[in-house]
Image: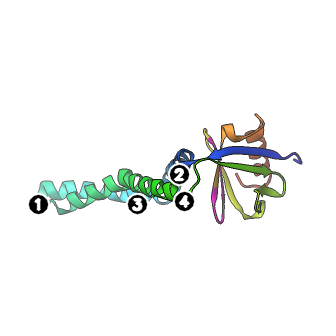
Amino acid sequence: MSKSIEVSFMWNKELALKTSKLYYDYDMRHSNKRYIGWFFVALVQFGIVGTLKHNSYGILFISTFLVIYWYYGRWYFRKLILQRFYKKNTPKNLEVNFTIDNEGIHTQEKVIEWDTILKVINLEEGVFIQNRDNAYYFENSAFISKKGKTALLAMAKEKEKV
């Protein structure tokens, strides 16, 4: 596939938060981190048994706190940190352009070669490209061509990155 794929969008705080949330949700569903949450749920069950049999509330309180933090609090705190970061460090609307071809992903500063890309994740809302240093997110509307997303996924499959 020799044709290049053009991607262009405006990077802002809202897109950054949306991107972070999508990646966070994907990571929680597809990584080994999800087992930590399951462990906390099992602790709640032990806490309930301990409360009913021995009138001991310690494990129940701690495990309930951990479950609430794991499933709700982590994103809340991450969102607060991201909001502060983007309030201080990022211009309001930064135009971002990428060109994707057989060599890799071209930005204004560098080329991200396909060898450094770990995987390409197809989501309903767009595409994540994860390399060793960063993760890039392209919404469906960011592709200049209507067939851009399809072409990118085909290229990624050809490079064995899907």
Q: How far apart are marks 2 and 4 (CA)?
A: 16 Å
Q: Circle 1 sits in a helix, a strand or a loop, which is it?
A: helix
Q: In which quarter of the image is residue 52?
A: bottom left
Label 2 vs 3, first from the N-terminus:
2
Residue displayed at 38% across by 51% down: 71
Q: In this view, does 23 lie above or below 123?
A: below
Q: Give the range drawn in magenta.
A: 126-135
- In this rendering, position of residue 4 left or right of residue 62: right
Q: What element carries label 4?
A: helix
For badge 1, the amino acid type reads His
User: Looking at the image, which residue is at 36% across and 50% down?
Assistant: 72
The residue that mark 1 highlights is 54
Q: Do the CB atoms of the residues marked 2 and 1 lie less than 8 Å apart?
A: no
Which residue is identified by label 2?
A: 20
Residue closest to the far right = 2
Magenta stretch containing residue 130, yes or no? yes
Q: For residue 36, which numbered disc appears in the image?
A: 3
Q: Does the magenta stretch include residue 162?
A: no
Give the Cα separation between the discs numbered 1 and 3: 26 Å
Task: Specify few, some or many for label 2: CA neighbours under 10 Å numbering under 14, 14-19, or 20 or more.
Answer: some
Dominant secondary structure of the magenta stretch? strand
* Mark with earlier residue (4, 3): 3
